[in-house]
Image: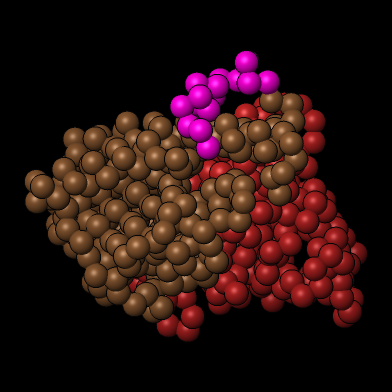
Chain colours: A brown, B red
Amino acid sequence: MGLFDGPLIEIQAFLDRMEQRGLARRLCAVPVDGWRCPAPQVVLREESALELGSTSSASLNLVVWREEQPGDRDEIVLVGPDLPQLAARGIAQPLALVVQAWVDLEPDRHYECHRQLREATYRLGLRGMMLRCLPGRQSIWCRIHRRSLSDGLDAAVLGSAICAALHDLPFVTRARVALVTADREVMEQLRPAAALVLDITEALVKMHESAMALDCDSCEYEAVCDAVDDLRRIHTRLVRGDEP
Amino acid sequence: MSPVVAIVGKGGVGKTTVAALLARALSVCSARPPHGTTFGAGQRVLAVDADPAGGLAMALGLEPTRTLDDLRRELIAKVQDGADAADLLATADYRLMQALVERGPLALLVVGRPEEQGCYCKLNSFLRRAIEALSAQFAVTLVDAEAGVEQVNRRVMRSVSHLLLVSDLSRKGLRVAEAIHAVAAASAPGMQAGLVLNRVPLGISPATIRSALSTSDALGPLSRGGSPPRALALWGAIPEDAGVIQFDMDARPLFEMAEDSPAVQAVRALLPRLV
């Protein structure tokens, strides 16, 4: 059993449904060296061709991992229109970004893994793209500069850049990035998975912050730990002092 | 590195007016780049209202919904809730962008006033980090500082490249400008600094002012000495402008003043010093 088995099943079921409905397609990875910047960018509203996941539209950002053999190559899946077609619909559009990483972790490095995988997304710097995340709300907010869109910034570039950022981490062996730009109703289908991810990651953070003092009987995440074996195991090891 | 210009001086000398008119001039340049400056089309301007008393937002005709202090308090609450460091940084980045009020190439960040009593050290420290994080992404950053030397003392100005010392012709105003300059020169020797006189009566030429500054006992210390930190160049003189007074009385944004207004033109003449 893995930490995110529950949400991963939900996410896979969602992607399968989207594929069956002809809404999902796989994109080829593209070189991103010309796009990557050392720091997160600022794009103002006036400069934007697209504003994805802002407060006026639906937004979702999930980062999960699995400790399995990596199998195939990286994958970029687009559910909905690509960025240039999306821009033709209007500037404010919904966005869900689902990042899955296959990881090869040293024993009980789960919290570090969680932190570094999320940072890889938070700190993503792409020329002409502003990306900001609000972890507590699982929100993502992205602005694309008009010039970058006309220079070819699209879902393949964004997905490839996220995969590349993940592979900068030594323990990541494979990545799958799903970008959902379809209607809000489609995106809402990811909410059950999102709720599970939030519970698990918040429980993981709480364990890390207060492992020794944590009283399971009074903890609001007790039910989550009961449902996710790996969390219970991590907690036990933390209390014993095994977690680095 | 893009210039970060702090507009400092005694309270009431017109710092906010100068900051607003500078923001206006830079925004116009962004739309129509003038000859003779390196400031180009579409370049961004960040204006920071760092004065807890506020005023720049109104002068620019912008309405902030969130201040830097709101953001600081939200982050404190998150720390108390046990959020981890990565989440805090991401939240700070997100909320900082959300706190910007935008109009065209201009973005405004308002510092706000802490609700609790006491000193502003934490807010000033937070402000310094925010300016450092954002200014690299803008062609120029204007910081309308609070009156006096506090923010200079607190190293809020660490990333400032240009110190624009605003004063009227009063002895007090000039003395405060000199004091701020001395503090800034000691803490950041590489910073460029210049004096801008505001509300100069019509008919007095810059040459006359310069002459007066070098000979008057009251004003002399500012430009008499030839060695740093005393040497303070006169960068400009903004004439008394009935338009500014009228806009203030009507509570109209100074940002909307006409291009041919004397104050607008005088502030525009400062641009080659800054960008």
Residue segment shown in magenta: A215-230
Residue B83: image quadrant is top right
Residue that extends furthest to the left in the rendered view of this protein: A21
Seen in the image, is A84 located left or right of residue B159? Answer: left
Q: Residue furthest top?
A: A218
Q: Is residue B254 magenta?
A: no
Q: Position of residue A194 (x, y in %)?
A: 37, 36
Say above or below: A224 vs B150: above
Nearer to the camera, A137 or A67:
A67
Q: Would you say residue A108 is visible in this rendering?
A: yes
Reply yes or no: does residue A224 show up in magenta. Answer: yes
**Residue under the point 53% across and 37% down:** A230
Residue at figure coordinates x 56%, y 44% from the top left: B87
Report whether A184 appears left or right of A59: left
Marker count (numbered)? 0
- Where residue A182 appears, as percent x and y from the top left, is 18, 46
Does the magenta stretch mainly form a helix, a strand or a loop? helix
Instruction: Evaluate whether residue B249 shows in this view.
Output: no
> Which of these two is toward me, B163 or A40?
A40
**x and y percentages locating residue B70 in the rendered image:** 58, 34
Please, is residue A46 above or below residue A190 in the view?
below
Residue positioned 19% across, 35% down in the render: A185
| Image point (41%, 59%), residue name | A69
Q: Is residue B105 above or below residue A56?
A: below
Quarter of the image for the N terminus of chain A: give it: top left
**Left/right of residue B14 with respect to residue A185 in the rendered view:** right
Residue A161 is situated, as x and y percent measured from the top left of the image, at 39, 67
